[in-house]
Amino acid sequence: MTAFNGLHVAGMAGGPLDHKTKELMALAISIVVRCDDCIAHHVHDAIEAGATREELEDAIGVAVLMGGGPGMIYATHAIEAVHQFLDRPG
C-alpha cells in the first residue's frame, strides 16, 4: 500500500495538468472501469481540489460517452456522490 500511495501522490502532483484536472480525469476513468470506491474517492478529491458541480457533471458526461451503457449506470453512482459531498450540511 505504501508504494501505491507514493505512486498516487506523485501522479496527482502538479505538472502540465493541474491537480483538479487530474482528479476529474480519474473520476471519469473510475466510472468507465466501474469502481464505486474510486468514484467516491475522486469525487471527494476533485471537490477538495476546487472542482465545481458543473465541472464534475461535465467529466461524468465524458465518462458516459466513453463507457456506454455500463458507464451510464456508474455515472449515477458518481452523481449521487456529488450530491452527498456538495449538498451535505455544514
Image (spheres, rainbow, N blue to C red):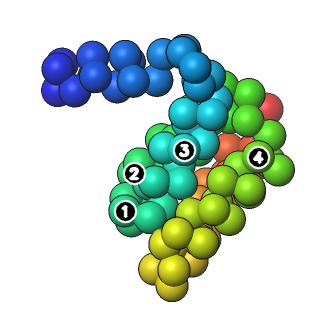
The quadrant where residue 15 appears? top right
Residue found at x 34% / y 25%: 8
Instruction: Label 4: state its secondary structure.
Output: helix
Counting from the top left corner in percent of width and height, residue 86 is at: 75, 44
> Which callout, 2 or 4, points to the residue nearer the camera?
4
Amino acid beneath label 2: Asp
Counting from the top left corner in percent of width and height, residue 3 is at: 17, 20
Amino acid beneath label 1: Val
Residue beneath disc 1:
33
Residue beneath disc 4:
55
Amino acid beneath label 4: Glu
C-alpha distance separating marks 3 and 2: 15 Å
Q: Earlier in the sequence, mark 2 or mark 4?
A: 2
> Which callout, 3 or 2, points to the residue nearer the camera?
3
Q: Is residue 87 left or right of residue 1?
A: right
C-alpha distance separating marks 1 and 4: 20 Å
Residue beneath disc 2:
37
Amino acid beneath label 3: Met
Counting from the top left corner in percent of width and height, residue 70 is at: 46, 80
Res. 44 in view: no
Q: Earlier in the sequence, mark 1 or mark 3?
A: 3
**Label 4 near label 3: C-beta < 8 Å?**
no
C-alpha distance separating marks 1 and 3: 12 Å
Counting from the top left corner in percent of width and height, residue 68 is at: 51, 80
Q: How many other residues sit within 10 Å of disc 1, few (<14), some (14-19) or many (≥20)?
A: some
| Quadrant holding the N terminus | top left
Q: Is residue 45 left or right of residue 12?
A: right
Residue beneath disc 3:
25
Residue found at x 55% / y 36%: 23
Q: Earlier in the sequence, mark 3 or mark 4?
A: 3
Res. 15 in view: yes
| Mark count | 4
